[in-house]
Image (tube, rainbow, N blue to C red):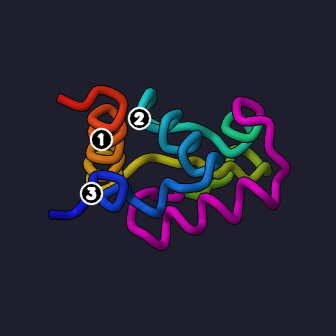
Amino acid sequence: MKHLIHTLNKAFDHRVRLGVMAVLLATDAVSFNDLKEVLGLTDGNLASHVAALEKAGYVLISKQFIGKKPNTTYTATAEGRAAFQQHLEVLEKLLRPD
């Protein structure tokens, strides 16, 4: 039998990705600037971690213009929500073994 630690999702190993998903699960959508501010990240750091989550199919990136200003918005996909919820459940089992 596989030990619980090996069932954690590697996509959420990094604290930034864990934070991104936590914020996205708490809200429907969040802008780049709001997410950057909440997590205290640089533009490049946030962009690279969100790109990794997008590649995994966990985050949807929407780009549009509001007036003449670009606006990037992130939402968690259904797959991302399910994967993150499963990740949290494994963490809870590790914290509270029965």
Q: How dense is the environment of label 1, judged by Cα within 10 Å: few (below 14), some, or many (20 and up)? A: some
Q: Amino acid at mark 2?
A: Leu
* Nearest the eye: 34 or 80: 80
For disc 3, the neighbor class at 10 Å (few under 14, some 14 to 19, many from 20) is: few
Q: Secondary structure at mark 3?
A: loop
- On residue 3, the disc is 3
Give me the residue at 85% from left, 49% from top: 42
Q: Which residue is mark 1?
A: 85
Q: Return the x and y of residue 85 as percentages of the image width and height.
A: 30, 41
Contact between labelled residues 2 and 1, with CB atoms less than 8 Å apart:
yes
Q: Residue at x 71, y 35 (%)?
A: 39
Q: Secondary structure at mark 2?
A: helix
**Residue 46 rendering spot, x and y as whole percentages:** 72, 53
Q: Nearer the viewer, residue 37 or 16?
A: 16
Q: Residue at x 53, y 58 (%)?
A: 61
| Region of the chain picked out in magenta, as a range | 37-61
